[in-house]
Amino acid sequence: MEIALCGLPRSGKTTLWTILTGIEVPPGAKAETRKGVTRVPDERLLRLSEMYHPKKTTPATVTYVDVRPVERGQGRADNPVLAELRPADALVLVLRAWDDPADPHPEGSVDPARDLELIETEFLLADLDVAQRRLERLEALVKKAGRAEDRKEKELLAKVVGWLESERPLREAEFSAEERKLLRGYAFLTAKPLLVALNLPEDRTADLGRDAAELGLGDLASRPGHDFVALSAKIEQEIASLSPEDAAAFRADLGIEEPALDRLIRASYRLLGLISFFTVGEDECRAWSIPAGSTAREAAGAIHTDLARGFIRAEVVPWDRLLEAGSMAAAREKAWLRLEGKDYVVQDGDVVHVRHSG
């Protein structure tokens, strides 16, 4: 899973990326695309590891990409900055909500709602440019060859253009599964799930638990393909330099119930429709990320393709039931450990052991 951080210049985007990945960016470093891997915090995995005492504990991971800042007037199909966002599975849009005369906002004033609209407009214009160019080529192809697949794609692109011209992001449009599969190749920016991260100043910790509407950004959580989290990159940067004990005390003093980064990562998972399942043992306890609705055979394939090919059955037990039982053997005796076939839909928190041939 790859998530790209985007935002206007001086939004705090790179500071947030540094906190997420632990990779330091030297002061004054040239703006460039950077990638880093973040471990997904999961209390369930830690508790399973406490029971098994494995040689290795491996959490699920997310790759976060810090791209160059988005600026006004970049909404074109061939813009190189926007092109860096297209491979991502989802976008985190960092909005600046802090003021500093020594570090002025590029638009002249601090207004997160305006910045959200500005960047969404640039994405809309870029997507519209891509769609219109392709639609022109398809119209020529249909006239020349009249192939059914070209006509079908032309109808879909005409629908896309109409939607974008109404100034609405594609993530809010209704498309069939077949249409979405076809559109995936275009990597439309407004079709990607969008997590809006409001970067607050240090003196607004009371606002960290508020929702988007309370903070003047509308009801983002109710819009398809959107989510929201309020955080303070400055505070998180300070916390990241402390020991776990001191960090917990610091959060308690500020009234922060949990790290904003945990909330951000969870929101990323929720936005992408991901769940976690676990494999456990004395060698390794590990979390795996799969799309919600995945079957046992697909989950086996996430571990290794050979497991999917040779899949026979999956032994499945909810993580909390396994902890309560104390062992797989005890869970089996209580009939909490089930044998499931290839079409079983894996649930978030399932502990899975794959029986396979070969």
Image (tube, helix red, strand yellow):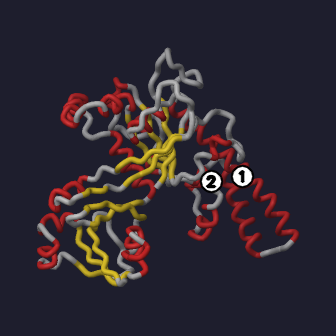
Q: Nearer the viewer, residue 217 or 255?
A: 255
Q: How many callouts does the rendering have? A: 2
Specify the amino acid type for callout 2: Phe
Q: Which mark is residue 77?
A: none
Q: Which part of the image, by quadrant, shows the C terminus?
A: bottom left
Image side of residue 175 versus residue 74, left or right = left
How many residues crowd mark 2 within 10 Å: few (<14), some (14–19), many (20+)?
A: many
Mark closer to the chain start, 1 or 2: 1
Q: Residues within 10 Å of mark 1 (few under 14, many from 20)?
A: some
Establish if 146 lies above or below 237.
Answer: below
Q: Is residue 4 left or right of residue 209?
A: right
Please tell me whether residue 278 is drawn above or below residue 111 in the rendered image.
Answer: below
- The residue pinned by badge 1 equals 130
Q: Is residue 210 left or right of residue 169?
A: left
Q: Which residue type does callout 1 highlight?
A: Val
The residue located at (50%, 30%) in the rendering is 11
Mark 1 and mark 2 residues within 8 Å of each other at the beta carbon: yes
| Relative depth, front residue between 106 and 286 | 286
Identify the element where label 1 is drawn: helix
Marks 1 and 2, how far apart at CA: 8 Å
Looking at this view, name the residue that lies furthest to the right.
144
Measured from the top left, where is residue 153 in percent x and y? 72, 67
Left/right of residue 331 with respect to residue 189 in the rendered view? left
x and y percentages locating residue 187 in the rendered image: 62, 55
In the figure, 113 relative to 152: above or below?
Answer: above
Q: Position of residue 316 (x, y in %)?
A: 26, 74
Q: Residue at x 12, y 79 (%)?
A: 333
Residue drawn 63% across the image and 41% down it: 81
Q: Which mark is residue 188?
A: 2
Q: Secondary structure at mark 2?
A: loop
**Relative to 259, residue 285 above or below:** below
